[in-house]
Image (tube, rainbow, N blue to C red):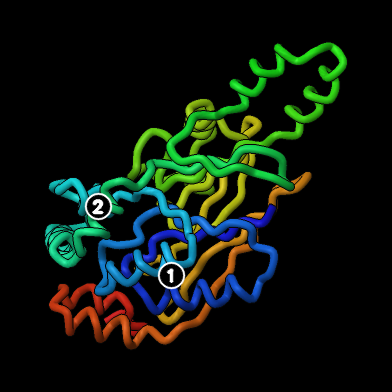
Amino acid sequence: MRLAVLSDIHANLAALAAILADIETQGNIEQTVSTGNAIGLGPHPNEVLDLLRDRAVELVLGNYEDAVAFRRMSSGVDFPDEASERVDRAAVQWTRRELNPANLKYVENLPQNLRLIGTPRHMTLKRDQPDERLTEARRGMFLGTLFQSRAHRQRAANRSILALHGSPRALNEAIREDTANSILERLGEQARADIVISGHGGSPFLREYAGVTFVGVGAASGTRVRPGETEYAILSVEDNVTLEARSVSYDQRLHVEAILEYGLPPALAARFDATGC
């Protein structure tokens, strides 16, 4: 199975369009997933959500969707100073006002996680579901002796992939390549999955620990990606798990101009200035 994963679009329609166009060139992508923060800091929240649904991209709740939909006091980000926090809150409030009723309802009903369960050749997608392999194992107890060997082989080949924004513990907890082993062990126990995909850390990586493969995804937009570029990843799940981090160039001028035109804080546009000014 080949899975395209993107994260942290932050209402950057130009970046999203560039990613989706690149995905179309890759061939044999069976599912595309966005691990949250599709909205929150950019000028096109409605257009981004509409395009994700139009392209059948599965989206999970991120900390910005949570802040917008449920009127949180904060997006849950650690800010370096008060000015940065004011900019963030203004963007969240603007997004809440800008969302049309249909998209606001859509965001309110986003799942906390997605789970793909099955063999690499055939996986079923579930929203906000526990690991169903335990249920399948119990179901196997009722099989006749004639079919026990076949059922055992099938269960042994099954995989469970969990996709979420932060961690199994919190929307705003980042899983990173250098996360302590003791933390990964606890997160793996809570995830009840073979593979855990997380976007909040903003950097691509693949790391195995205690029988769980942890996957990080680069940001589509924001300060953690170079100006004029957008990132996503392709996860291949066969006998082995591999990750291809992809970077795509796009014209960011329309995004920057829209930030200023639509009345968002100018500091959000400054993040896309390659000179750092």
Q: How many marks?
A: 2
Number of the front mark, 1 or 2: 2
- Give whichever of 209, 212 is nearer the camera: 212
Say which amino acid is labelled 1. Answer: Val
Q: Position of residue 36 (x, y in %)?
A: 38, 54
Residue under label 2? 105
Q: Position of residue 265 (x, y in %)?
A: 15, 73
In the picture, measured across the screen, residue 96 lies left or right of residue 63, that is left
Which label sits on residue 209? Answer: none
Q: Position of residue 202 (x, y in %)?
A: 44, 58
Does 14 appear above or below 79? Answer: below
In the picture, measured across the screen, residue 131 lies left or right of residue 93, that is right
Residue under label 1? 225
Instruction: Point out the tag, 1 or 2, that comes first from the N-terminus.
Output: 2
Does 21 appear above or below 153? Answer: below
The C terminus lies in which quarter of the figure? bottom left
Q: Secondary structure at mark 1?
A: loop
Q: Secondary structure at mark 2?
A: helix
Category of crowding for the residue at label 1, using alpha-carbon neighbours closer than 10 angstroms: few (below 14), some (14–19), many (at least 20): some
The Cα–Cα distance between marks 1 and 2, rounded to whole angstroms, is 30 Å
Does 226 appear above or below 135? Answer: below
Category of crowding for the residue at label 2, using alpha-carbon neighbours closer than 10 angstroms: few (below 14), some (14–19), many (at least 20): few
Q: Residue at x 69, y 64 (%)?
A: 28
Figure quadrant of residue 272? bottom left
Figure quadrant of residue 224? bottom left
Q: Residue at x 40, y 45 (%)?
A: 166
Q: Residue at x 57, y 33 (%)?
A: 193
- Give whichever of 107, 8 is nearer the camera: 107
Say which amino acid is labelled 2. Answer: Lys
